[in-house]
Structure formats: structure tokens, C-alpha cells
Image (cartoon, coloured by chain):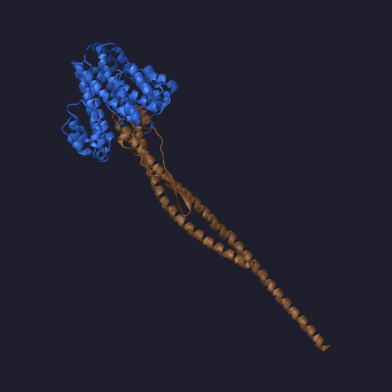
Amino acid sequence: MELIKKNAQIKLAEQGRDLLREKMDALIQEFFHVMESVSQSRIELEELSLVAQHSLLIAQAVDDPVTLKSASFATRRGLTLHITGKNIMGVPVPIIEKKRFVKNLLDRGYSFLGVSGRIDETAEKFEAELDLIITLAETETSLRRLGGEIQMTRRRVNALEQVLIPELKRQAKYIENTIDERDREDLFRLKKVKKIIERKKKVVKKA
Amino acid sequence: MEFAYVNARIRGMRSRLLDRSLLEQLINKPDLDSLIAELEKTAYRQELEKAGVLFSGITRIEVAIRKDLVRTFRTILNFIKGEDAEKLLTIILNRWDIQNIKTILRGKKIQAIPSEILECTIPAGQLDEAALTELVKQPDVKTVIDLLATWGIAYARPLILNFKEYTETRDMQVLEYALDTFYYENALSVLKKDESEDARILKRMIITEIDVNNIKTVLRVIRDRIDREEAERYFIKGSTEFDTKKLLSLMKTGTIEGALKELEYTPYQFLTKIPQEYIAVEKISAFEKEMERYLVKKAVSQFLGNPLSIAIPIAYIWAKYTEVTNIRVIARCKIAEMSEKELREALIYV
């Protein structure tokens, strides 16, 4: 009975391990897919950041940092983002609403007649950087969560493969050996009893 | 109008402006410390010493040159205080008042702390530091406008007229556009009443500025694909050569290249010579830089004009402003370790 139970447990553990392996493969595939877009966006972000910094430097140099700060008063406002989520193989990942922060000349909050094109270009480049940072926030969070899930799944697969299944097999083997031993003992005992009975029968016949 | 005394003083001040060879020396300085050491040998010494008590590095230079600019312009205003010429010269210096009022209104809208707002003002116009300090102490946009009206500052008028729209939309642009357009309209209406040669000289300069601003507006609205009717609101009126009709015909071309082609037989022909790579990416700052250079050259060339007219103060104010900009560009590019080529591109030489 116990052996049947153990064998069923081994089968279940092996099925679980195979399922987890499949899940891990799917997660790895998704992970590499997301990673490709993250590394592409990272490169883009670095390039954009350099260009934005350069524009800022020129604007500060020509227009005076106080003029820039004054313009920033007009544009200072909070950003509202709508965040929902989705599941990738049971892993919850965020979806950040795609909002364009690159603004039109008339939407920056200041009169463009009194603000130089250099400041506008700087604002535009930093707005584009913000767009990319928000996209990256979504994909990087997904990447981190997928990575965490892959690690956890790998640990589970390893635990099943290295610990639980061998332990169950060892237990099943032990039970099997014990039953075999008991069988052999029973057989021996039966043979012994048979011999005794036969011997007793012979004694009775002689008498 | 009597400019003989003012111009004699300004000629003295002009001799203290940095010449091209000194600017070259500043460009060739290896670091900021040697740049400061070189600047300490010039007229900026006094302000550099004062700024050195509180600041160091690039901030020291920027604060010093800003204060020097303010001190210089205030000195010029003091030369002509109470005279007829004051009315004309304040027209030029009022641009700083406009900028300061805008900064205060922006700061008040977001409830920035008064000291932060005050740091962003440049009291080079009619409103001195004391007036600006009083303005930034006001609790909100409305009280700032009320105080300007109480003081009888002309710029309160467009603000009062547009305040209702501002309260409905909470859009600071409403007040800012009103201020920007009022500045030019007010300047032209003051100059229209004055038939003197000085008024004519100043009017020519103001109209050139209006043209430059309007051409910039055309290029910017084309780039940002802004509706033609909407864009028309942002044209500053007053120019004869580039009136609304002409500006709209520039806009009708729909592309920067098209607009530049239309400018071929105008004083702004130089814009067509801007490298194709900038035209292709519609880099407005490249056009803007050339137009600023044109404006500065035109203003500074007034030094060659009538020595007893407003031409000399106009030229000096622009030359001083350009000098301060050039020093800041050199200093900023030095700390960013930019190449000499990039530095020279950013400079506005006179």
C-alpha cells in the first residue's frame, strides 16, 4: 500500500518537474524576448540622454541658467500614469499606459515668443527621454519579475530533481526491499513449517 | 534729445568691453580657475570678488557677470534719469522687466518659494531689486498684478485685460503672450508719437527684432505643424516688410525649406546658407543662432552711427549683453570639456 502511494508520489513529482521545466523554458524564451527590447531601449536611452545633456548645456550657456529655471517654473507639474497588469505564465507584470510626454510648442505652459528655440529643443529632448524611461520602467520591471520567477522555478525543479524524487525513490526502494525480505522470510517460514508438519506426519505413521 | 553726456560716459564704458583678442585668450584657458584669474584682470574683477565670498566655480562666474550686467544697465539708466532720453532707453531695458514679471507670475502659479523666484530674476530693467523683492512677496498671481497696477507699471494693463481668461483656463501662456505682444506694441506706440531721429533709430531696431521674432515663430510653427489660424495669433504686429500677409505666405509653404526659399530676396537671405543637415532635421536653434548673430551685428554696428544719438546706448547695451553671453558660453563649455570647435559654434561674436 505504502509502495503504491510512494510510486504515485514519484510519478506526480516527475510530472510536476516536467511541467516546471516546460514553464521555465517558456519563461526563458519570454525573458530573452523582453531582454532584447530592454537592451535596445537602454542603448537608445543612453544616446538620447547624451543628446539631451548637450542641449541643456548649450541652453544654459547661451540663455543663462536662471532663464531656464524660470521656464521650468512654467512647465513644473506632476505626471499621472495609469498602471494595469497582465500575467505571463502566472507572473504578474505591469502595463504602464503609453502617454506621450513630448509636447507641442503650445503645450509647454510658457509663451514660446519669450523662450528660445534652444530651451524648447532641450525640453523636447528631455520629454522624449521621459517617454523612453517610462517604457523602460515597464519592460525592466517585467524583466526583473520574469528573472525572479525563472530563478524560483529553477530552484523548484532542482528541489524536485535532486531532493524530493531521489528521496521518494529511496523510500520506495526501501519499502520494496523490506517487502521482498518479508516475502523471503515468509517463504522460508512456510517451508520450515511444511518440513515440521511432514516430519510430524512421518512420526505419526511410524507410531 | 540730449545724448551727448550719456554717450561720452558710454564711450568710456565701451573701452572696458573685452576685445576679440581677450576673448580668444579666455577660450584658450585650460580650466575654470585660469579663466577666473584672467577675468579678474578685467572690469569684472569687482563683481567676481563679491561673488567669490558666497560662490565658487561656474556659479561664481555666472553670478558675477549677471550682477555686472545689472550694475552696468542701472548705471546707464542713472545717467539719464528724469530726461527725455530715459523714455527711449527704458524701452530697450524693459525686456528684462517682462522676463522678470513672467518669472514671478510663473513662480507664484506653482507657489515656489520667494527666494527661489528672486534668484531667477535679473533686475536690469525699470523694476529694481527692491521692487522685485516686493513683488515676489505677494501671495499669488492676482496680487502681483494688482501691485504692478498700483505702481502704475504699464505692463499691468495686458495682465489685467487677460486675467479673466487666465482664471478660467489656469494657463499661464495667456498672460505671457499678452505681455510679449504688449511689449512691442507699447514700444511702437511710444515711438510713433516721437518724431525725433532717436525714435526713428530705435524704431528700426525694434522692427528688426519683431521681424526676427516673427520669422522664428514661422519656422517653429512649421516645425511643430501648428494650425495656420492658430499660429497667426502669435505674430507680433508692427513690421511693414514682414506683415501678417507675408508671414502667412511663408507659412503656406508648409516646410522649412519652402519658407527659406521665400526669404531669399530679403535681409534674411543668410538663413538659406545654413547647412542642409540642420534644415533636414528642422533644428530651430541653428536658425535662431544665425538670426541672433544678425540682430547683434546690426545693433552693435550702431556704434558707427550718429555719436550724439541713441545709437550709441543701443549698441553698447547689445554689446554688453553679448559679451556676458560669450563669457558664460566659454565658462560652461570649459567645465563640460567641450571641443574648441563646439565652443566657437556656440559663441555669439560681435
Quadrant housing residue A46: top left
In this image, A109 relative to A94: left or right?
Answer: left
In this image, B307 relative to A39: left or right?
Answer: left
* Residue positioned 39% across, 32% down in the render: A76
Write down which chain is painted brown: A
How far from the left and from the top, in percent, is residue B59? 40, 26
In this image, A65 relative to B298: left or right?
Answer: right
- Looking at the image, the residue that sits furthest to the right is A207
**Which residue is more in the foreground, A37 or A149?**
A149
**Which residue is more in the foreground, B318 or B104?**
B104
Q: Is residue B234 above or below residue B144?
A: below
Q: How many marks?
A: 0
Write down which chain is painted blue: B
How far from the left and from the top, in percent, is residue B225? 26, 39
- Looking at the image, the residue that sits furthest to the bottom is A206
Residue A13 in view (yes/no): yes
In this image, A42 relative to B295: left or right?
Answer: right
How far from the left and from the top, in percent, is residue B210? 23, 27
Viewport quadrant of the N terminus of chain B:
top left
* Residue positioned 76% across, 81% down in the render: A195
How far from the left and from the top, in percent, is residue A138? 43, 46
Q: Is residue A25 above or below residue B167?
A: below
Viewport quadrant of the C terminus of chain B:
top left
Residue A146 in view (yes/no): no
Q: Is residue B55 above or below residue B82?
A: below
- Looking at the image, the residue that sits furthest to the left is B265
Quadrant housing residue B132: top left
Quadrant housing residue A113: top left
